[in-house]
Image (tube, rainbow, N blue to C red):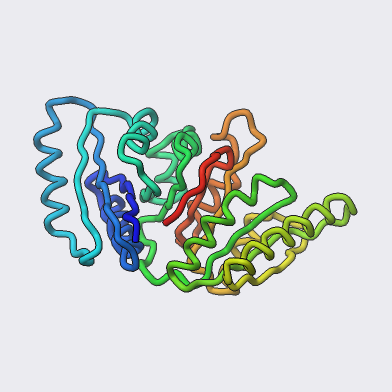
């Protein structure tokens, strides 16, 4: 089994600890290396931060298949995460957030800019997200082909955790858009059938907020994880609230998000 490399952002708060705990849980079925990353603004902080990170690593309970190493660097989350991902050949980035207000407090108007700065998936959890088994994964798609970029990743997770996919889309009255949605669904269903992944499909009413309908569906079906592809039509990604609202959902569900412009295939 190949080793996967996860990057976990830790800011020495309970949110960072929540991200680390979730990463360890995700690693339970795999041979993994978790790279715990802390960025400082000044070289004078390196020694103290390194000691703190090492203490966290030594106290973390992990499986025998999981190795945790620390990285402390001078840098900015806005500019250096993508560099570390390439240097360390990372498969997945895991980070925590305090929720909608905390998300904006930490990242300001550049929330989605951070997440889309790298071409590997982000796994985002909130401070009080429960660490539990992933059994039901929601995959919302739309009429754009970019929304299908998340399909393989959700399938990988299903194979690892013996989970099933709940694929949702909106009904459209326009014949052209309706056919596009049907075509997307057929493509995804075939992919999951070929991979022997159980896939449930549902078309949601078109009226009203898609994000709210998705979250209502999550509650109804007891979803454990939301998986989405980011493909905003906005010139500036920070103005797209759809993805941000799902990431900081009030149900505290974790969310996997990938930049749909990514050209690589990822595995977990």
Pick whichever, 255 or 216, lies toward us. 255
Left or right of 110? Residue 138 is right
Q: Residue at x 67, y 36 (%)?
A: 233
61 w.r.t. 106: above or below = below
Q: Residue furthest front?
A: 1
State the residue in front, 146 or 14: 146
The residue lying toward the viewer, choosing from 157 and 44, is 157
Quadrant of the image occupied by residue 238:
top right
Instruction: Determine whether, in the image, residue 252 is placed left or right of residue 17.
Output: right
Quadrant (top left/top right/bottom left/bottom right) for the N terminus: bottom left
Q: Which quadrant is the C terminus positioned in?
A: bottom left
Q: Where residue 111 appears, x then y in whole percent?
A: 47, 38
Depth check, front residue: 162 or 72: 162
Where does the image place residue 183, in percent across and percent down from the top left? 78, 56
Residue 89 in the image, given as x and y percentages of width and height: 35, 41
Residue visible at 65% across and 72% down in the picture: 200
> At 73% across and 56% down in the image, what residue appears?
184
Q: Eyeballing the image, is 173 above or below 28?
A: above
What is the count of numbered marks? 0
**Residue 10 rendering spot, x and y as whole percentages:** 27, 46
**Does 116 appear above or below 152?**
above
User: What residue is at 53 percent from the left and 60 percent from the top?
Assistant: 154
């Amino acid at each position: 089994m190949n080793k996967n490399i996860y990057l976990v952002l830790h800011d020495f708060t309970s949110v960072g600890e929540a991200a680390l705990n979730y990463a360890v849980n995700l690693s339970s079925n795999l041979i993994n290396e978790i790279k715990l990353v802390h960025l400082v603004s000044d070289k004078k902080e390196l020694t103290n931060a390194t000691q703190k990170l090492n203490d966290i690593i030594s106290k973390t309970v992990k499986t025998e298949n999981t190795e945790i190493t620390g990285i402390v660097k001078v840098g900015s989350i806005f500019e250096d995460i993508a560099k570390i991902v390439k240097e360390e050949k990372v498969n997945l980035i895991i980070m925590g957030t305090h929720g909608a207000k905390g998300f904006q407090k930490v990242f300001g108007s550049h929330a989605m800019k951070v997440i889309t700065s790298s071409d590997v998936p982000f796994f985002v959890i909130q401070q009080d997200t429960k660490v539990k088994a992933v059994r039901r994964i929601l995959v919302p798609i739309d009429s754009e082909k970019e929304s299908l970029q998340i399909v393989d990743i959700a399938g990988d997770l299903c194979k690892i955790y013996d989970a099933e996919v709940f694929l949702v889309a909106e009904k459209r009255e326009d014949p052209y858009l309706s056919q596009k949605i049907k075509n997307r669904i057929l493509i995804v269903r075939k992919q999951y059938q070929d991979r022997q992944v159980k896939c449930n499909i549902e078309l949601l009413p078109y009226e009203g907020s898609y994000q709210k309908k998705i979250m209502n569906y999550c509650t109804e079906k007891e979803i454990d994880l939301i998986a989405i592809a980011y493909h905003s039509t906005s010139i500036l990604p920070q103005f797209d609230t759809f993805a941000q609202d799902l990431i900081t959902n009030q149900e505290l569900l974790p969310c996997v998000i990938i930049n749909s412009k990514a050209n690589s295939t990822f595995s977990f």
